[in-house]
Image (spheres, rainbow, N blue to C red):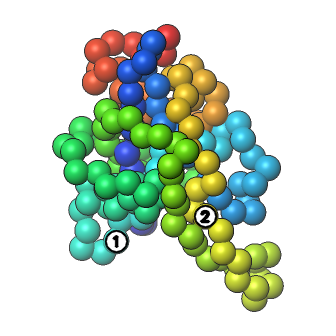
Amino acid sequence: MPISAGILLFRRRAGVEVLLVHPGGPFWRRRDKGAWQIPKGLIEPGEGAEAAARREVGEELGIDVVEPLTPLGVLRQAGGKMVEAFALERDVDPATVQSNMVEIEWPRGSGRLVSFPEIDAARWMTVADARQAMLASQQVLLDRLDDLAGGPVGT
């Protein structure tokens, strides 16, 4: 089974905030609660998880990630996909995010290809807000961030 890699970006303001992305395209268009996630994507053959996470964040956010990453471990999403995640403390301006474009057949079976941004929004959220907004299977990453951020980040 293919495995994905991604980065949970976080910053410290009045409390800890995390940067989540909303997937683009017709499947996610009207979904909000439970749709937000970390920027991530498939690890290519011969590519390491850390390199894939850096590449995916570059593609989805339009930024270069050169700083050291902290491993957050592997999780299994509800659909069975495995994700190896890393954390990085870094501030990013969501207004400057420039996602790559992807092309899919839509509607399925129609033979018609449609292009859309891989992500259509990026947003800083408090950890409490992130727990409401993000994919349930990725919420464990917020728990794993506790140790890195020096204690409970859910406040």
Residue lying at 34% horizontally and 71% vertically, measured from the top left: 44
**28 lies above or below 13:** below
User: Can you give x and y, in whole percent of width and height, for residue 18 in the image?
Assistant: 46, 31
Q: Mark 2 Cα within 10 Å, few/some/many (few <14, many 20+)?
A: some
Residue lying at 31% horizontally and 42% vertically, measured from the top left: 86
Residue furthest out toward the front: 96
User: Can you give x and y, in whole percent of width and height, for residue 130 in the image?
Assistant: 57, 29
**64 lies above or below 128:** below
Query: Disc 2 vs disc 1: which is toward the camera?
Result: 2
* Quadrant in which the N terminus is drawn: bottom left
Residue 44 bears which disc, if any? 1
Q: How many marks?
A: 2
- Identify residue type, mark 2: Pro
| Front in this rendered view, residue 19 or 140 | 19
Residue 138 in view, yes or no: no
**10 lies above or below 121:** above
Residue furthest out toward the left: 68
Question: Would you identify the image quadrant in which residue 104 lies?
Answer: bottom right
Residue 117 bears which disc, if any? 2
User: Can you give x and y, in whole percent of width and height, for residue 138 in the image?
Assistant: 50, 39
Residue furthest out toward the bottom: 111
**128 lies above or below 109:** above
Residue 53 in view, yes or no: yes
Check disc 2 and report its element: helix, strand or loop: strand
Counting residues from the start of the chain, the first of labels 2 and 1 encountered is: 1
Check disc 1 and report its element: helix, strand or loop: loop
Q: Mark 1 Cα within 10 Å, few/some/many (few <14, many 20+)?
A: few
Residue lying at 28% horizontally and 24% vertically, measured from the top left: 148
